[in-house]
Amino acid sequence: MDVQDGLDLYTRMCFLRQFEERADVLYRRGLIHGPVHLGLGHEAIAVGAASVLRPGDCSLGTYRGHAHALARGAPPDAVLAELLGRAGGICGGKGGSMHITSVPHGYYGSYAIVGAHLPVACGLAWAAKIRRTGQVTVCFFGDGATNIGAFHEAVNLAAVWRLPVVFVCENNWYMEYTPIADVIPVALPAADRASAYGLDRIVVDGNDVTAVRDVVGAAVTGARDGRGPSLVEAQTYRLKGHSAADAAAYRPAEEVASWRDRDPLLLTRTALVKVGTAEAVLDEIDVRTKSSLAELARQVLERPVPEPAGAWTDVWSDGSGQWRN
Amino acid sequence: MAELTYRQAVSAALAQEMARDDRVVLLGEDVASGGVFKTTTGLRERFGADRVWNTPISEQAIAGAAMGAAMGGLRPVAEIMFSDFYATCWDQVANEIAKVRYMTGGQVGMPLVLRGANGSGGLGFGSQHGQSVENWAMCVPGLKIVSPASPAEAFGLIAGAIRDDDPVLVFEHKALYGRKEEVLDGEHVLPLGRARTLRAGRDLTLVGLSITVGICLAAADELAEQGVSAEVIDLRTLVPLDAAAVLGSVGRTGRLVVVEENPGQLGWGASVAAIAAQEAFGSLSAPVTRVSGGNVPLPVAASLEAEVDVTAARVVAAAQAVLGHGRQRSGITEQT
């Protein structure tokens, strides 16, 4: 591992980790209105994939989407304000945690209906293909989404139309509270379905940020070069529950412990130490990031709440919410 | 001036807009070969494979791809072959397309059209291919709803829908596809949200949409023979709703009959009736009345279908009842 490259990736993952840890604290203090789904443990996928995208490329995620927005460059204060229901929220307070979106950064939204955004990703890729813009679309979704019709319709359409889209399944082995193995007839939810659509069986260690970068990078290059879509299964693990309200007691302790040993930050940290980085340097990144996010949360909490009149705007293209005269 | 069928008018509107704006692209099942209702005939040949895309039978993929394409800088027009099939992609329509502008605080626009065949019209299509489903969309903020009543209307309203920057669902009536009408040459485009008055009248107002506009006109003819002057309004669009046109008419006539093809259970007519009851109460001489399709799934045998479909005779009967209510107060008893 190149030290500077590794430190950069570690710093980015550390930011996502600390952002989610801070969101968890804020949720527990009752400061977040509505549900929150944390991406703790998934950081290597968000950072690795974002690192191969160009500014004009498109990405979409799920209700577990804070990290994907931030990884593309969404301003953290605006994301945090959206979570906290404060002025300046990235969606004006109308989306909340599950719908974080930052179009100026190429992040076309977090979608809270499982599988719904895979067809939407096809549409973004289709527009790029018709308009010959060279843009690639990357669509992140969970293992549970591979059992919903929209997944199959979208992957089929992408394959038939040879769309420049990369579907990345974040297989964390649980669809909400149920082991994915209980609800699929194959071993791997995405990879073992790929052949049905004429696609390669691609599996990557989703906790290894450079492996994600390499595998998603190759798929993105293929899409950009006109070789059509890919379906990548990135294997990872949720460090906490389905939502912040879920203690995840249904998971065996030894399973959780074994995955904690494979924590993506720990893996990168170990690799960096191996090539000579001092532990103290990494500790300093951790401490600095944690305190900067605590300070950011403090600042955002000082903001006013959104003006109530904002509830009536943005339904229509003229900015209004009027349906009749 | 040329005589166009309703289906030719649909195709002409698509062609007009595709020629005008190269961001307009079509997708749907069989659209490249003209479609099962022949509403996209010749468009692939004229505009090329890059503008007209056949899809698998995958309504979620169709609606979702239209949504993504709208975010990606195109103005897609997706065909949902039968409007009954919206049930298979309702997540995309009601949860995603309708709400994405709002949920993102206005970060994205959604200039797309979903269009296809709707309605019964006595053709025997039954419960899964013959429904009028505008109501499904009307209870979801964020969707515009267009239901053209004639060839010229289809031409102008579909063009208007494509130029609109919001998501529009166009419900074409399958029983009207063969109707012919002289249509003026040149560009056609109608703004959304403006009702039209087809016939002026003094005694009562008949409000229709799509196929029930013709039914209202037939009823008005029959009522005229009985000495009753009925005003007929075509709403054209349910969202935006031209409530002012209805309220203005009721203000003059004092009586309102709303005629919808779908089952009456929570139909769009209930919304129109509620608006009139609340906002034109002082003008009303009789209860607002609704004529609607039967509150049953749509049967197929012609005798059963005719039993539940809306007819001019049922509209006339409703009108007579409404006029009966108001006789004493309005003083028209002597005239009839």
Image (cartoon, helix red, strand yellow):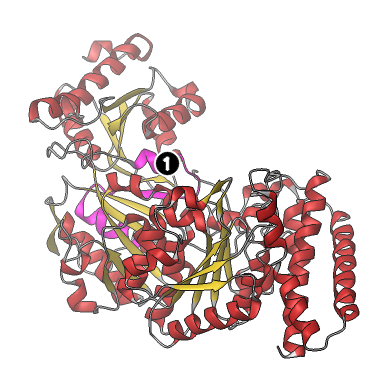
Residue type, mark 1 in image: Met
Chain of the residue where label 1 is placed in the rendered structure: B
Q: Which region of the structure is painted magenta?
A: B134-159
Tell me how many marks there are: 1
Name the residue tied to disc 1. B138
Q: Residue at x 32, y 72 (%)?
A: A198
Residue beneath the point at 65% across and 57% down: A238
Residue at the extreme top of the image, as rendered:
B328
How far across and down, in percent of the image, does residue A57 sit?
Answer: 54, 79
Q: Quadrant of residue B332?
A: top left
Percent coordinates x, y for residue A319 in the rendering: 59, 57
Whether the magenta-drawn stretch holds residue B145 is answered as yes
Image point (21%, 74%), residue name: B44
Q: Quadrant of the N terminus of chain B?
A: bottom left
**A110 lies above or below B295:** below
Q: Between A314 and A211, which is closer to the camera in this rendering?
A: A211
Residue B38 screen position, x and y as percent: 15, 60
Residue at the outermost front position = A254
Q: Nearer the viewer, residue A30 or A319?
A: A30
Disc 1 crowd rating (10 Å Cα; few below 14, some 14-19, many 20+) is some
Q: Nearer the viewer, residue B226 or B262?
A: B262
Residue B177 image position (x, y, % from top left): 16, 51
Which element is circle 1 on?
A: helix
Residue sticking out furthest to the left: B302
Tell whether position A55 is magenta.
no
Whether A258 is drawn above or below B117: the answer is below
